[in-house]
Amino acid sequence: MGVTEDMADDLASDTIKYIDATGDEDIIADLVKVLGATSQTAEEAFLTSIRVRRANIKAKALLTQRVKAYKAKRDSAKPVEGDTSA
């Protein structure tokens, strides 16, 4: 990535950590105002990074959920060792 994208991504990462800790979603709008007032390019890169990171977080959560469900289903289908009831 270029300097603009790298800096925007770092800011997005820090922003998401802040939101996770505080629940303060308004910080995004505040940061967009600051960035947009000085650099539309930085504003767009930041918003893109926020969207991409949030999408990735949601996708990873879904994958984790599916893996857990698969393992639970697989493990419940295995016969228990020492079980002679079958």
Image (cartoon, helix red, strand yellow):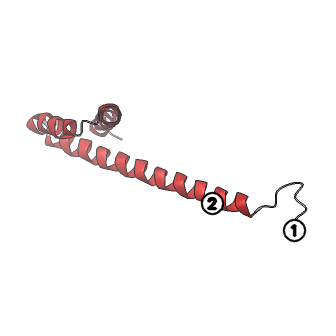
Would residue 68 appear left or right of 78 to someone viewing this image?
left
Q: Position of residue 62 (x, y in %)?
A: 48, 55
Residue at horizontal 23 percent and vertical 40 percent from the top: 25
Residue position for label 1: 86
Residue 70: assigned label: 2
Amino acid type, mark 2: Tyr
Residue 67 falls in which quadrant of the image?
bottom right
Q: Are marks 2 and 1 in contact (CB under 8 Å)?
A: no
How far apart in space, not on screen, are marks 2 and 1 (Cα)?
A: 23 Å
| Residue 53 appears left or right of 86 | left
Residue 42: quarter of image: top left
Residue 14 vs 86, above or below: the answer is above
* Residue in front for this viewpoint, 83 or 39: 83
- Residue 46 picture location, percent across and down: 25, 41
Query: Residue 8's spot in the image, x, y percent?
Result: 28, 37
Q: Which labelled disc corresponds to residue 23?
A: none
